[in-house]
Structures are given as C-alpha cells and as structure tokens.
Image (tube, rainbow, N blue to C red):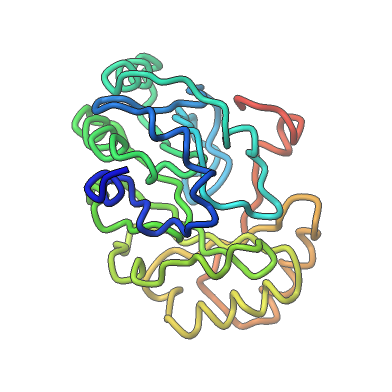
Amino acid sequence: MSERVTRALGLAQVPAEAEHRIRLLRQLQPGELLIHEIYRSIQGESTFAGLPCVFIRLAVCDLRCVWCDTPHAFAQGEIRPRVEVVRQALSYGCPLVEVTGGEPLLQPEVYPLMQELADAGVTVLLETSGAHDVSAVDPRVHIIMDLKCPDSGECARNWWPNLQHLKPSDQIKFVIASRRDWEWTVHTIRHYDLQERFTCLVSPAFGRITPLEIVTWLLESGLQKVRFQLQLHKYVWDPTARGV
C-alpha cells in the first residue's frame, strides 16, 4: 500500500499489529465505500436521542473494544459507489443522517460522503472513535467522538490532538464499564476542561455495569454539565438485534 493511500485512509494511526483488521479496505477504488448496512431507526444516543435517523454503517474497524456491540461490522460489507449510498440515504426523506461503523474514518470516501449529505440539507452526525484524526471532517458535521476508557482495552489508542479540532457543537462520549473507567473519565474531563468546551456524555457498557451505579457516581462527582445517557435502541428492541 502506497504512502499516499496510507495517509488518505488514516492508516498511519493504525499500529502494525492491527494491520490485518483493515485488509478488506485495500480492495476499494476511488468513489467506493465498504458498507455494512443502511437503515432508518431512532437515534439511540447523544443529544439527538429519540429522533428518527438514517444510519449509514461502514464496515471495518481497527480497534477491538472488549464490550463492542457491533463486531459483525468488522468483516461484513458490500462495496458500493458513494453516489448510490448518498441516494439511498436521502431516499428515506429523513432530515437526520448518522455515519457510523466500524470506524468510518478509515475510508477516504467518507469525507465527500458527509459533504454531499450536508450539501443536500440534512443534519449529519459522525460517530467515531477517538483514535483517528478528525481535523478533515466537514465543519457542518456534528462529531460524536468516543474517548476509550481503560476497560475498553483500547485506551492507548486515543488521539489526544483531536481535542484541538473539535467544535463546541461536537460531543464526547465515554462508555463506562467499571469504577476505574469512571475515575479515568472524571480525571480526563477535569484535566482537559471538557465539560466547558463540549457536550460530554457518559453511558454504561451494556450488561457490564448498571445505569444506577453511573448515575450515583455522577451525582457524587460534582460534575454539573456532564450528561448521562442510555442506548435507547437496546431498550426498545432486543439488544442483539441488527438494523435497528
């Protein structure tokens, strides 16, 4: 793989030991995306929770979070022209579209995809890990960025320069699986003054910790601008269901 392509894919931030996880992306040609699924549902997370939303889920992720709820997107996908993906997403007539994964920023065509969706007048959300540079994302896009806590197993992959590129309208999400994760989250929010700069969201790793524990810790912490959230779709449908 050429250095140019490596940079375009953001693969300079993919460690050598994770190289095999992104091998499916090598087959992509300009104008193509590897799509796992496109569907309409409700937005389950973020400050947009509860709204009808079209989801464009891209395949492949270079991370392997312990609690990942979409491992089926790691290696299952269909190569589709970007123009076709845009057409299908807009065909639902829904004003809110989320680009998610997998890790969408691994695919270079995701940038013009988001631009074209924004040009069409819809509100575009990007769900991305904190492991990849967000500086090239269209400023009209609302970034919802995960900062990986220690129990995810991927905390070392957080790309801290991203905090300089996020906008005040962007959101940072912390998925909590333990007291250790919570303490790390509180320290991180305070150290970088995140609750004053962005919307900060905390949620339980489903099935690993109770919502009550996190709510209790949040109320005890003194953090006044951090928002607790649940993954609504896991309470409406079977937590293992796909395409909802």
Q: Is residue 196 left or right of residue 87?
A: right
Q: Is residue 161 above or below residue 11?
A: below
Q: Residue at x 73, y 63 (%)?
A: 177
* Residue toward you, 14 or 16: 16
* Residue toward you, 82 or 179: 82
Q: Residue at x 24, y 28 (%)?
A: 30
Is the N terminus in the top left, top right, bottom left or bottom right quadrant? top left
Q: Is residue 149 above or below residue 205?
A: below
Kindly indicate the quadrant of the structure image that contains residue 29.
top left
- Measuring from the top left, give residue 194's x and y in whole percent: 43, 75
Q: Residue at x 40, y 16 (%)?
A: 92
Is the C terminus in the top left, top right, bottom left or bottom right quadrant? top right
- Measuring from the top left, give residue 91's x and y in whole percent: 36, 14
- Measuring from the top left, give residue 98's x and y in whole percent: 42, 36
Q: Residue at x 22, y 51 (%)?
A: 139
* Residue toward you, 68 or 42: 68
Residue reaching furthest left?
A: 119
